[in-house]
Image (tube, rainbow, N blue to C red):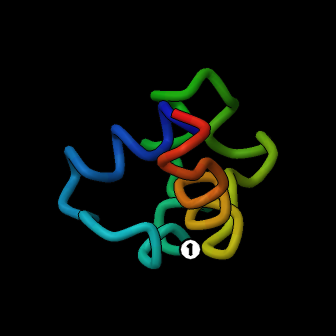
Amino acid sequence: MIGQRIFGIACGHPDGNDADHPADDPVHKLLLGRDPVTGARLASQPTIPRFENGVSRTAL
């Protein structure tokens, strides 16, 4: 998910709420080592923000 987030930011999707568009994008799949046509879908929009907000400042 970190890789998906980094490539998403680099490709102009600065917010985790934009994760649904690149989840099926063949180029994003290829960048993350998945088959662009038959590879599994990347993390969905609800998953990316949960991942980003799952750690509190205290835990860091």
Residue type at tag 1: Asp
Per the image, the residue denoted by label 1 is: 20
Label 1 sits on a secondary structure element that is: helix
Q: Is residue 57 left or right of residue 49?
A: left
- Within 10 Å of disc 1 (Cα), the crowding (few <14, some 14-19, many 20+) is some
- The one nearer the camera, 17 or 33, is 17
Estimate the x, y position of residue 39 in percent, counting from the top left. Answer: 77, 40
Q: What number of labels is visible?
A: 1
Query: Residue drawn 34% across and 40% down?
Result: 7
Classify 6 as above or below 41. Answer: above
Estimate the x, y position of residue 5 in percent, counting from the top left. Answer: 43, 46
Query: Residue drawn 20% across and 44% down?
Result: 10
- The one nearer the camera, 16 or 34, is 16
Estimate the x, y position of residue 27 in percent, counting from the top left. Answer: 43, 42
Q: Is residue 44 left or right of residue 18?
A: right
Classify 10 as above or below 47. Answer: above
Q: Is residue 52 left or right of residue 46?
A: left
Query: Which of the 4 image quadrants contains residue 47?
Result: bottom right
